Amino acid sequence: MRAVVQRVGRTRLSVDGKLVSEISGGLAVFVGIKAGDTEAQADVLAKKVVKLRIFEDGEGKMNRSVQDVGGEILLVSQFTLYGDSSHGNRPSFSNAERPERAKKIYDYLACKLRESGLTVKLGVFGADMKIEQFNDGPVTILYEL
């Protein structure tokens, strides 16, 4: 499982020109699910995302979590995080989990994130999403289990 976690000021996600999800500040989390990934890994990722201290405290140090600042999370499934272009110019996505299984783990991850009490909004699994994002910092963390 791979995640790209970005600190954002705001993020808007649309499908077919219609606004689906929007957060005013917090984290945009793009998650790729690899073949064989488990709910146990999703548990670990959820705990990490909620506690990740990448927001500034009163002294300007990254010492606060999304929970500490009352932020929101936009969770987006992104199988392309498992794109492999090491053998040519067209990426292979053979390492990504099958869509039906990946969706179950994605939904499970969303539930685990919501258990923290945070507002968690979602992308549309498998859709062609358009995302407008105002990165804060920018701060981008890559996390892999």
Image: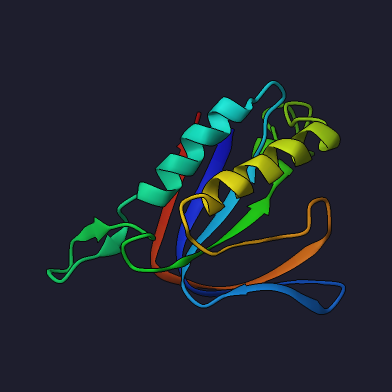
Measured as percent of width and height from the top left, residue 11 is found at 58, 73
Quadrant that contains the N terminus: top right
The relative height of residue 7 versus residue 90 in the rendered view (above or below) is below
Give whichever of 130, 24 is nearer the camera: 24
Measured as percent of width and height from the top left, residue 92 is found at 78, 32
Question: Which residue appears at 75% of the width and 32% of the height?
Answer: 88
Q: Is residue 73 left or right of residue 99?
A: left
Give whichever of 22, 117 is nearer the camera: 117
Residue sticking out furthest to the left: 59
Measured as percent of width and height from the top left, residue 139 is found at 39, 60
> Does residue 92 appear anywhere in the picture?
no
Question: Which residue appears at 61% of the width and 55% of the height?
Answer: 75
> Does residue 67 appear anywhere in the picture?
yes
Residue sticking out furthest to the top: 36
Q: Is residue 106 left or right of residue 72?
A: right
The relative height of residue 133 versus residue 54 in the rendered view (above or below) is below
